[in-house]
Amino acid sequence: MGLFKLSEKVLIVKGNYRNFVKSLCDALKTGYFLWGFQEGSEQELTKIEKYRDALIVFYISEHGFAMIARVGEVLYGDIKDLYWPDEIEKNEVKYKYRFTLIPIKVSRCFLEDAELCRSPEKVADKSCFVEHKDVVGYINKECADVKINTLILPSSVIIVKHECVAQKLVEYLDKQEEVPIKIIVANIAKFLSTATTNDAVHAFLRVVGRVARGKDHDVKEAVNAVLTNAPEHVRIAIADALTMLRQRIEPAVKVLAPCSENIASVLQDPDLVLGALAVSLATDSLGSDVVKEVIDAANSVVRENLFVVMLCRLYNPRVLG
């Protein structure tokens, strides 16, 4: 996968289905996934605080794994707002120790089936989750020096201490889940001087374009250059998500590579134009990962710069041919 290093920690966070759906559906709009622990669970929040740089793997009780994320912010102070369904039903705050996550990969069902957000009583199909037994089977096969029967312990946060187990857990989930571009765009919008959806989409295209232009195609450098005002943990989460998405954009980047250096000097905004071309070329391979606003913006930029398409075709006939 290329993004996860053995020096990083992996934490498994557990929760129930209804609360997960509430948090994820809001995250698709805001970019942040709110989560919390009940009073008396200070030790669980301490784990989150201690390992702020860890990758978070979310496990939905009685269902399976459904998300990879990074820690956003730990929320301090007296929490009085009711948020999750079980809090609203009982009219009391159950989860006083709250924090946010920034999703970087999510079960594709929750990105494709809008009905899961519109109708919270609808339960996602079994295929929407990565089952515990499948993950354990993969880990036991890949990690020769360890045999495990379970990853899920009776606590809300589990630190995965074995390096191979942590590596293979994330590696397996990476193959099963999708990058939530809506959440990436929502996070980008928070840290632009003008936070309209169109501006955020253009910033996303500029990151892709900067990766396409760079000799080393460094995603983190591209994110840092475009989102200079975003906190480091946000830039890291966005870079992680785009690194996971990169394998689907890579063929388009390679197609553009012969012309990217040569046309940059004739463009006022080369990152935007090359990013739009890359997304347009990769639409089929990206599939449900790309939201309509991104596709529409990419196509609009390409139409406004058709001369660039013609120039790129001189270097590679496959460019939007």
Image: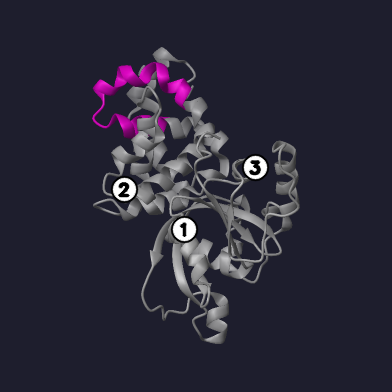
Q: Is residue 273 magenta?
A: yes
Q: State the residue position of label 1.
A: 101
Q: Amino acid at mark 2?
A: Asp
Q: Dot 1: few (<14), some (14–19), or many (≥20) neighbours within 10 Å?
A: many
Name the residue nearer the viewer: 184 or 33.
33
Mark 3 burial class by Cα count in 10 Å: few <14, some 14-19, many 20+? some
Name the residue rendered at 48%, 30% in the picture. Answer: 281
Magenta stretch secondary structure, dominant: helix
Please state which of the two labelled residues, at mark 1 or mark 2, is closer to the viewer: 1
Cα distance between the residues tagged 1 and 2? 23 Å
Q: How many residues crowd mark 2 within 10 Å: few (<14), some (14–19), many (20+)? A: some
Q: Is residue 241 magenta?
A: no
Residue 201 seen in the figure:
yes
Q: Quadrant of residue 11?
A: bottom right
Q: Which residues are magenta?
A: 253-277
Could you say whether the residue bearing mark 2 is in a helix, strand or loop?
helix
User: Which residue corresponds to the image point at 49% horizontal and 32% vertical from the top-left?
Assistant: 249
Q: Which residue is mark 3?
A: 172
What is the count of numbered marks? 3
Report helix, strand or loop for mark 3. helix
The nearer-to-camera label among 2 and 3 is 3
Decide if residue 302 is in sight here: no
The answer to whether mark 3 and mark 1 are in CB contact below 8 A is no
In depth, the one of 160 and 19 nearer the eye is: 160
Towards the viewer: 156 or 204? 156
Residue at the (39%, 19%) spot, across then down: 312
